[in-house]
Image: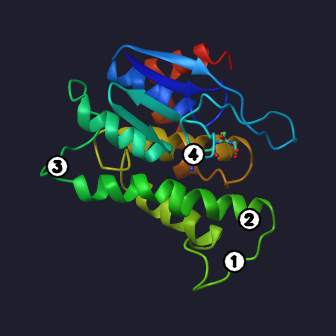
Amino acid sequence: MITLYHSPQTRSGSIVWLLEELEVPYQTKIVDFRRMDGTGSRDASNPHPHSKIPALVDAEDTIFEGSAIALFLTDKYRANRMGPAVGEPKRGEYLSWLAYRPGVMEPALISRRFDIKHVYGAMGWAPADEVEEVLNKHLSSRQYFLGDSFSAVDILLGGGLHFMMMAKMVKDTPVLKAYAARVTDRPAYRKMMQIDKR
Ligand SMILES: N[C@@H](CCC(=O)N[C@@H](CS)C(=O)NCC(=O)O)C(=O)O
């Protein structure tokens, strides 16, 4: 049985949403973690090397970091096809956008939120305004990140974008508002919200 190391209303909610889309059996283990307000502490039972969430154990495999978990799950559990397999069209785009969330989008938008100056050539991401431009341009001509098909990228990146729009960390342009409404209008999203009692 898959075990997800989880805490309600955190980034691990995206993995609950994905597991619900995949319709595979899983259990959650609720763990503590260090919060922004100084409360919480590392949970020794969490296999993430920094005790961050999400982390996931499936049989012999332990996976940490949301994008790696999403890739692992969508490669292994193919019945509901939540991403292109190796050798299929758009596999490269799929990997790129999965990496873009923790590698570029999040650090850019979070840096701006905390007034951290962008330094070209030093930081591995791009300035937040440029990230917003890229996302708006990409989504202005597509239903989903990969075109016509919903994939795990729309959960990891799209769900993150939706959260950041609600937190006023991203400008809610008509393109992004329509996209966020589209990706969250799904039974698996509502199930995750109900599980996390949001
Ligand atoms: N890069 C990680 C980020 C995970 C993360 O930072 N999660 C937060 C909760 S939303 C956490 O565990 N924070 C505790 C800490 O930073 O020690 C991912 O995308 O999975």
Q: Earlier in the sequence, mark 4 or mark 3?
A: 4
* In the image, the residue with mark 3 has its CB under 8 Å from the nearest atom of ligand 1: no
Under tag 2, what secondary structure? helix
Which residue position is annotated with label 1?
A: 118
**Looking at the image, do the residues carrying marks 2 and 1 touch, with CB atoms under 8 Å apart?**
no
Under tag 1, what secondary structure? loop
Cα gap from disc 2 to disc 1, whole angstroms: 8 Å
Which residue position is annotated with label 3?
A: 86
Q: Earlier in the sequence, mark 3 or mark 2?
A: 3
Q: Earlier in the sequence, mark 3 or mark 1?
A: 3
**Looking at the image, do the residues carrying marks 4 and 1 touch, with CB atoms under 8 Å apart?**
no
Q: Earlier in the sequence, mark 2 or mark 1?
A: 2
Which residue position is annotated with label 4?
A: 49
Q: Position of residue 155 (x, y in %)?
A: 46, 38
Q: Which amino acid type corresponds to the residue marked 3 in the rendered image?
A: Val
Which residue position is annotated with label 2?
A: 112
Q: Give the quarter of the figure containing the N terminus.
A: top left
* In the image, the residue with mark 1 has its CB under 8 Å from the nearest atom of ligand 1: no
Which colour style is shown? Answer: rainbow
Image position of 22 (left or right of 45): left
Q: Is residue 53 above or below residue 94?
A: above
Other-residue count near label 4 (Cα within 10 Å), few / some / many at <14 / 14–19 / ≥20: few
Of tags 3 and 1, the one toward the viewer is 3
